[in-house]
Image (cartoon, grey):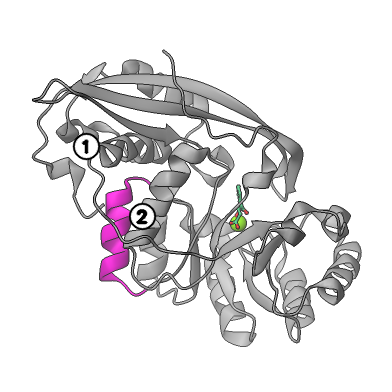
Amino acid sequence: MGIDFHKSKDTRNYRVRYQPYCRQFQQPLQTHHGLWSHREGILIQLSALDSGDRLREGWGEIAPLPWFGSESVTEALNFCRSFPDTIRAVDLVKVPDRLPACQFGFESAFIDLHPSGTKSNRFKYCGLLPTGKAALNPELSVWRSGYSTLKWKIGVAEMSEELDLFHQLISNLPIGMQLRLDANGGLSTTQAREWLGACEHAPIEFLEQPLAVSEFAAMQRLAAEYSTPIALDESVATFPQLVQCYEKGWQGIMVVKPAICGFPSKLHQFCHEHPIDLVLSSVLETAIARRTILRLAATLPNLHRPLGLGTGHWFADSAPVDTART
Ligand SMILES: O=C(O)CCC(=O)c1ccccc1C(=O)O
Ligand SMILES: [Mg+2]
């Protein structure tokens, strides 16, 4: 990950193959952005014979999240079709900034070809609860999966109804369990204040993206006024946005979804040069992108917060996707 693959000495020609996929969720995920029922993406495979005539393969994944400002799967697929079917590491610069999920996918495949022996890190994870009343079901597997932190979506239903569920959820939380609340930018300033008031004496790790991306200054004011931390998510979706929020003086938590944040090497470098309070988070990608994210996590400094990757139970077919055809 420390290697910048744009300047890599790897001059080999790799054959590129790609395979679109679609995975159904066990149940749709309800967020302020709407109802989401399946994940579509593209698996990337690079292959070449090495000097000893052994086949070398690297895998990457493009898992866009257009409602967060990344490209769509169609745009990603059009790019894959237009890209040469043989590439070298230096060709990564040709993946433009308007396609951050493609930047992640293609560089991931190169990283996979050059695995560096990183220390194995045992991380804590945050499990994703279903939205609304469903979270209260004690039979849910997330309650028994050993998570120390759970995330619950808000900004979806009527405020009073959600607050009522919130109090029930809090009173049922096991001792020591923390909760992340994620509004996906769906609250007004007044509602955000009401939520932050309700969080005051509850075990809330942070309130994620309470307001719309355009409300940066208002989120800075909320962060200064309340004891519950505010985390940015949609506001820092892509790498240029992350840099911009940092430069505008955001000192709070940043939830970064590597799969839509552009080149992992750029994120790696930025995190090494700047002391950011980082949470890595899933976009409900497959095991391929997850592997890249875990490799990245193992190389980052100050990654003290549980990883937002506790989403495996979301898929109906939880077997890892490990084959690709063209
Ligand atoms: O970050 C996590 O803990 C879980 C992942 C998550 O919440 C999520 C998953 C897919 C798309 C958007 C989001 C989000 O954080 O808003
Ligand atoms: Mg979020």
The answer, for residue 181, to whether it is visible in the render is no
When asked about the image quadrant of residue 195, the answer is: bottom right
Residue sitting at x 79%, y 73%: 173
Say the numbered circle drawn on residue 289.
none
Residue 144 shown left or right of residue 275 in the figure: right
The answer, for residue 278, to whether it is visible in the render is yes
**Magenta-colored segment: predominant secondary structure:** helix
Say the numbered circle drawn on residue 296.
2
Which SS class for mark 1? helix
Magenta stretch? 261-275
The residue carrying pointer 1 sits among few (fewer than 14), some (14 to 19) or many (20 or more) residues within 10 Å by Cα, namely some
Farthest-out residue, top = 326
Using the image as rendered, state which of residue 146 and residue 101 is in the foreground. Answer: 146
Residue 18 shown left or right of residue 90 in the figure: right
Quadrant, the C terminus: top left
Using the image as rendered, state which of residue 39 and residue 234 is in the foreground. Answer: 39
User: Where is residue 19 shown, x and y percent of the image?
Assistant: 45, 20
Mark 1 or mark 2: which comes first in sequence? 1
Disc 2 marks which amino acid? Leu
Measure the C-alpha gap from mark 1 to mark 2.
Answer: 20 Å
Residue sitting at x 50%, y 40%: 287
When asked about the image quadrant of residue 300, the answer is: bottom left
User: Where is residue 119 shown, x and y percent of the image?
Assistant: 31, 61
User: Where is residue 22 shown, x and y percent of the image?
Assistant: 59, 25
Tell me the residue that label 1 is attached to. Answer: 93
